[in-house]
Every structure is written in C-alpha cells, then in structure tokens.
Amino acid sequence: MPKPRTAPPALATTGTAWPKVLTSLSAYGQWLLANPNPALVGNVATPGCPVAQLLAQQVQSLITENAYVTPAPPVFSVVTAPTPAYGHEVLMVTAARPAEPVVSSANSKVTIGAYDAVPSALFEVTLDKGADGKWRYCTIENQPEETVAAVPLI
C-alpha cells in the first residue's frame, strides 16, 4: 500500500447527531480516496454493502493507476431522520460536492482524470450500526435515481 500523505481524520460516528456523523464518514471516505488503502474501507462502510463494494473498487483502481483523488468535501444542507435510531438508519440528505481531480501519485501536478461534481440533490443514505456502536455507510442512493449518476461517496 502507498504510504498515506496525511493522517486520517478522527471518526465521530456514534450517537444521532446526523450532520456530524455524515460529515465525519464523508471526511474519512474522502481521505481514503486521497490515501488509498482497501484495508480501511470497513472504517466507513459496512462490509458487503454497496458503498463498501464501490469504495473498495475505487480505492483498488486508484492503487492500480498509481493515483489518488484531490478531495472536495461534500456540503450537507438538509438531514432528516426518524428517531430513535436503531441498528439500521435511513436518512434523507440534501448534498452536493464539487468535482474532484484524480492525480498521479508519481507527479501530483499531473491530473489523469476526475470524479464528476455532484449537483445539489436528494439522497437516501442507509447507515448500519456495527457491534462497536459506530455508524457506517451501507447505501447512498439518489432520489429520484435518474437525477445523478452513480455516487460513490458524498
């Protein structure tokens, strides 16, 4: 695995302060795209869930391409959820994210691609609560689904 360029952000993924939980999960996921390591995907996504599978594929692809993402943090503007939270939580989230350049690990001045911007849209986000009491992504689906192409991580 490539050596991380920066230390990972702390995860604040317990409790029901949903904006804080989502911001923390996304910050770590964005860090993971900037510092690809498939062994760390389980920190933000439940193994076997669609987000974990997609994130693992993206991270492996970045390693194969000797590249990393220059992350742009998402902006969450609305988060609604039923309370109280149990082991599986569905949130309705309005979020947007600028485009993210994919750059060469060998030369950070060389852009080799980009993850498209995500325009402000409504998403249904499913979080799973692990045995450790921490929330992790399971699904992120655009509502209605045809508005935005596949969203790996918001």
Image (spheres, helix red, strand yellow):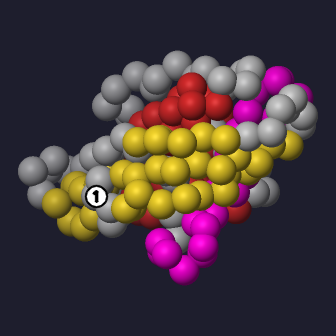
Residue 145 screen position, x and y as percent: 60, 75
Q: Is residue 127 found left or right of 22 in the rendered image?
A: right
> In the figure, 120 relative to 1: above or below?
below
Q: Quadrant of residue 128?
A: top right
Identity of the residue drawn at 58% across and 66% down: 142
| Secondary element at tag 1 | loop
- State left or right for residue 18 relative to residue 153: right
Q: Which one is nearer the viewer's eye here, 113 or 38? A: 113
In the image, which residues are magenta?
A: 128-149
Q: Is residue 59 left or right of residue 49?
A: left
Q: Residue furthest left?
A: 109
Q: Quadrant of residue 102?
A: bottom left
Rendered residue at 55%/59% (across/down)? 122
Label 1 belongs to which residue? 99
| Amino acid bearing label 1 | Ala
Residue 144 shown in magenta:
yes
Q: Position of residue 47 (x, y in %)?
A: 76, 50
Q: Residue at x 31, y 31 (%)?
A: 5
Q: Is residue 63 visible?
A: no
Above or below, 125 against 143 in this view is above
